Image (tube, rainbow, N blue to C red):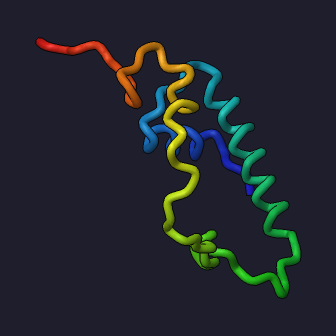
Amino acid sequence: MSLDLQTVRRVASLARLHLDQGEDQRLQAELNDILGWIEQLQAVDTEGVEPLAGAGASAMPMREDVVTDGGQAAAVLANAPDRAGEFFAVPKVVE
């Protein structure tokens, strides 16, 4: 399947694209290339391949909701520009 210039202009109009002089021919070539790729994909034998709707069909492994690796305030604040005890210190903002 290939698109003629009139169809490309109609699609551009529906998509509210402003095409300058000569751009419609370039767009026609690009759209025809895309349709060619789609035809190639349709030629692939997919017999016996289950359709995949997304990754939601598989269950995510769950982990225990426990506190781990805590009590490392010194390591976390090692690169902080300013600190107040075990907290980040930030300038006061008043408007």
23 left or right, relative to 46 = left
- Residue 23: image x %, image y %? 63, 25
* Relative depth, front residue between 89 and 51: 89
Q: Quadrant of residue 84?
A: top left
Provide residue 81's location: percent of width, then percent of height: 47, 14
All told, the count of numbered labels is 0
* Front-lying residue, 44 or 49: 49
In which quadrant of the rendered image does the C terminus lie? Answer: top left
Residue 39 to residue 81: above or below:
below
Is 4 left or right of 49, judged from the image as shown?
Answer: left
Most foreground residue, 33 or 81 = 81
Specify the quadrant that holds the N terminus: bottom right
The single residue placed furthest to the left in the displayed view is: 95
Where does residue 39 sit, x and y in percent of width and height? Answer: 79, 61
Observer-nearest of 43 and 14: 43
Write the residue at 87% across / 70% down.
Answer: 44
Horizontal side, residue 48 vs residue 91: left or right: right
* 51 relative to 26, above or below: below
Res. 41 image quadrant:
bottom right
**Residue 74 x, y percent position in the rendering:** 53, 30
Residue drawn at 55 percent across, 56 percent down: 68
**In the orientation shown, which residue stands out farthest toward the bottom?**
48
